[in-house]
Image (spheres, grey):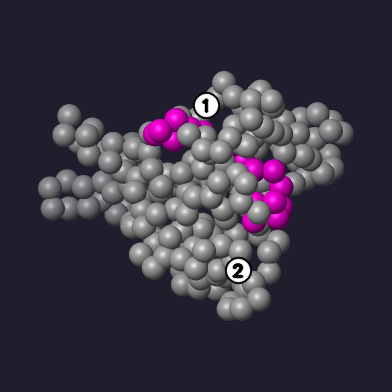
Amino acid sequence: QKRMKTAELVTFGSSGLDRAAELRGDEAALLSAQNHPQTDCLLLWRGKLLVHGPNYDRLFVLRPDHPVLSTADEPPIFLGRGNERQHIFAYDISNWHPTAGPEQPINGFLDNTEQHHPDLPADAVFVELRRILVRLSARDAAVGATAKAVLSWHRRHRCCAKCGAENRMTPGGGQRVCDNRRPQHLPRTQPAVLTSTTHRTRTLTACPPTCS
């Protein structure tokens, strides 16, 4: 029981996010939720999340009427409902080009650069999620990682895997559809997990072919 309670505290396991599956096929309901004045809107730029600086411990939330959201590359993706039953959407403005500072993410495992959009408050900066993950709450970490993963999937699957024609995002971003052959493409966003097998003070580092 103790181990199960500990498992519930992993970064992506205790966000309390309601996926609200009943809304995903209802275009009118999604549009109403998208424009609701209390809806939380997350913003991403080339895979980086908009967060509060300088502590980088909270996602920066915008309201649907903020003008910067109108510059998004595609319609937003619907993530679900938060703990206070508010709807959460994620917008991607990767086509924006910064006028100052590094524009391209630094190659390598960790990108320490930051970008600030001139139409946003001074403390709102785009930061690499891997750099700040341990500072975020479980809810913000899970929601931010989901937004990053789904938007990345949409960028990489713009063409149909069967015929090569360009496909389109369905309302809410839950899938992409090819109008040529009508197949549905669904995102896979499961996080990779590394595990360690231990026995007392020893760790299993290799297993012979005869081991079952």
Left or right: 148 as drawn, with respect to 167 = left
In the rendered image, is residue 3 in sight?
yes
Instruction: Classify 10 Å Cα crowding around label 1: few (below 14), some (14-19), many (20 and above).
Output: few
Foreground tag (2 vs 1): 2
Q: Position of residue 109 (x, y in %)?
A: 47, 67
Question: In this view, which residue lies farthest toward the top?
Answer: 22
Q: Position of residue 29 (x, y in %)?
A: 64, 25
- Label 1 sits on what residue type? Ala
Q: Position of residue 153 (x, y in %)?
A: 63, 46
Question: In this view, which residue lies farthest toward the right?
Answer: 180
Left or right: 180 as drawn, with respect to 33 = right
> Decide: marks 2, 1 in contact (CB < 8 A)?
no
Q: Quadrant of the N terminus?
A: top left
Q: Nearer the viewer, residue 1 or 18?
A: 18
Decide whether residue 82 is among the magenta residues.
yes
Find the magenta span and give its range.
68-85
Q: Quadrant of the C terminus?
A: top left
Which residue sits at x=57%, y=55%? 44
- Under circle 2, the secondary element is loop
Decide whether residue 153 is among the magenta residues.
no
Q: Nearer the viewer, residue 209 or 128?
A: 128
Q: Quadrant of the rendered structure where residue 167 is?
A: top right
- Under circle 1, the secondary element is loop
According to the picture, the residue beneath numbered tag 2 turns out to be 118
